[in-house]
Image (tube, helix red, strand yellow):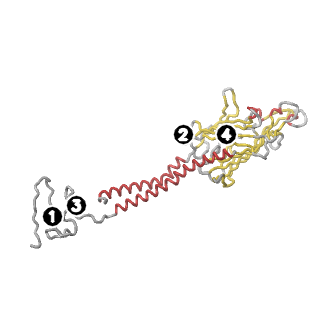
């Protein structure tokens, strides 16, 4: 069914306007919408489990041996360890910032009950949802390592550097990374680009030098004075030992979302009379995310990369294609001139014109050559006036 000229113009304008709107949307979605989507989600809830690596050294000091019996320190070997961390989003959190709370424990699984608990911390920090860096507030976080009858004792701590997330759009460069044991940040150096289960990841590594834990937190366990023989030394004179900490942390990050897909720590705690003298090992083990945790982190990364891809690439392409098609259709209809338009409109009421076509009417004139007579618009109820036309053949 042919469209009238007015209808064609209306449809053409609609298509051109729709096409322009779709092209604008295709340009705006990657620059505006993605910036809104590409943030750490506020419903974040992550549990990670890391275990010591089979075949590698795993040593734990039996702390009771320092205070009981007549012998020296007892260091257990081949101790099975599990580190568990539970990260949730707490208040204050909003469109640009979020507060993360991470409860972390390290246990030896060969001992039942609380006696197997080696360390426990609760860390809180408010970060930027896109960059992953702590906000400028002072303090921007807290750490609890002790408890009383009312629960954990939170000590205000100013966090610097990244912690539990890398930036959206992680780059191959060095980032500062916060260590809660030392309470300061160290360089996380880019090592290589690799793959984990067919997913591209960036490998970063942080080396924490030997540091006195007494200088960080003046807890009784971080500096002990005992008879020399209790330290495994000769004599009974009191000897003061400080607990030192060092670590090599490896992180494998999915770069689009900043998700830490895999993590590992080669941690070493020891008592010594100086940083360079390792007298008694307190803890030494290499713990790494287990396979279930890696798969879970990969799923979280994929969910977020799919969302970024949808708004950053798929929708813009679809809108651009539809916009071009709509513009082309609108321009075609607007410039197209219909052919075969009837020379005479049907009289009012829809009756056909008996003279339409190529035949010659009774007056002897062809339709195309007939003179045009124009009448003034008048009352439709006026009587019909018959007009005689001169005929050429008279």
Q: Secondary structure at mark 2?
A: loop
Around disc 2, counting alpha carbons within 10 Å, would you say few (fewer than 14), some (14 to 19), or many (20 or more)? few
Residue topped by disc 2: 94
Q: Nearer the viewer, residue 244 or 152?
A: 152
Task: Name, please, the residue furthest toward the right.
Answer: 235
Q: Which is more N-terminal, label 4 or label 3?
A: 4
Relative to 376, 253 lies left or right: right
Q: Which is more N-terminal, label 2 or label 3?
A: 2
Residue 134 percent coordinates (x, y): 61, 42
Residue 204 percent coordinates (x, y): 68, 50
Q: Secondary structure at mark 3?
A: loop
Residue topped by disc 3: 345
**Residue at coordinates 87% horizontally, 37% vertically from top-left?**
232
Residue topped by disc 1: 373
Q: Is residue 375 above or below residue 75?
A: below
State how far apart marks 3 and 4 are (Cα). Answer: 83 Å
State how far apart marks 4 and 1 are (Cα). Answer: 95 Å
Q: Is residue 81 above or below residue 187?
A: above
Residue 328 percent coordinates (x, y): 40, 61
What numbered label is drawn on residue 224?
none
């Amino acid at each position: 069914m042919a469209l009238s000229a007015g209808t064609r113009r209306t449809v053409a304008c609609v298509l051109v306007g729709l096409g322009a709107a779709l092209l604008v949307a295709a340009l705006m979605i990657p620059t505006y919408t993605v910036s809104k989507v590409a943030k750490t989600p506020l419903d974040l809830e992550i549990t990670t489990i890391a275990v010591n690596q089979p075949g590698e050294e795993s040593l734990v000091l039996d702390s009771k041996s320092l205070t009981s019996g007549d012998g020296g320190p007892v260091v257990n070997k081949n101790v099975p360890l599990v580190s568990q961390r539970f990260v949730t989003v707490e208040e204050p959190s909003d469109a640009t910032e979020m507060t993360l709370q991470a409860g972390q424990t390290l246990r030896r699984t060969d001992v039942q009950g609380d006696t197997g608990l080696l360390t426990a911390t609760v860390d809180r920090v408010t970060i930027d949802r896109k960059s992953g860096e702590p906000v400028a507030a002072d303090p921007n976080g807290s750490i609890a390592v002790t408890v009383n009858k009312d629960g954990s004792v939170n000590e205000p701590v100013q966090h610097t550097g990244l912690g539990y997330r890398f930036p959206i759009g992680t780059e191959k460069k060095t980032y500062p990374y916060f260590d809660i044991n030392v309470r300061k940040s160290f360089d996380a150096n880019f090592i290589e680009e690799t793959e984990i289960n067919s997913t591209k990841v960036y490998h970063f590594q942080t080396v924490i030098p030997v540091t006195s834990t007494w200088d960080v937190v003046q807890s009784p366990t971080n500096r002990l004075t005992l008879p020399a023989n209790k330290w495994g030394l000769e004599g009974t004179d009191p000897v003061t030992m400080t607990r030192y900490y060092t670590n090599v942390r490896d992180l494998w990050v999915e770069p689009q979302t900043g998700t830490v897909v895999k993590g590992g720590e080669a941690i070493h705690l020891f008592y010594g009379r100086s940083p360079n003298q390792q007298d008694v090992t307190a803890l030494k083990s290499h713990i790494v995310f287990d396979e279930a945790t890696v798969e879970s982190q990969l799923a979280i990364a994929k969910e977020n990369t799919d969302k970024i891809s949808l708004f950053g690439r798929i929708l813009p392409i679809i809108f651009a294609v539809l916009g071009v098609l709509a513009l082309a259709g609108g321009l075609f209809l607007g410039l197209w001139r219909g052919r075969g338009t009837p020379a005479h409109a049907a009289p009012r009421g829809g009756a056909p014109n008996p003279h339409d076509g190529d035949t010659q009417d009774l007056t002897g004139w062809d339709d195309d050559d007939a003179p045009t007579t124009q009448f003034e618009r008048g009352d439709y109820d006026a009587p019909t006036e018959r007009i005689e036309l001169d005929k050429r053949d008279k």
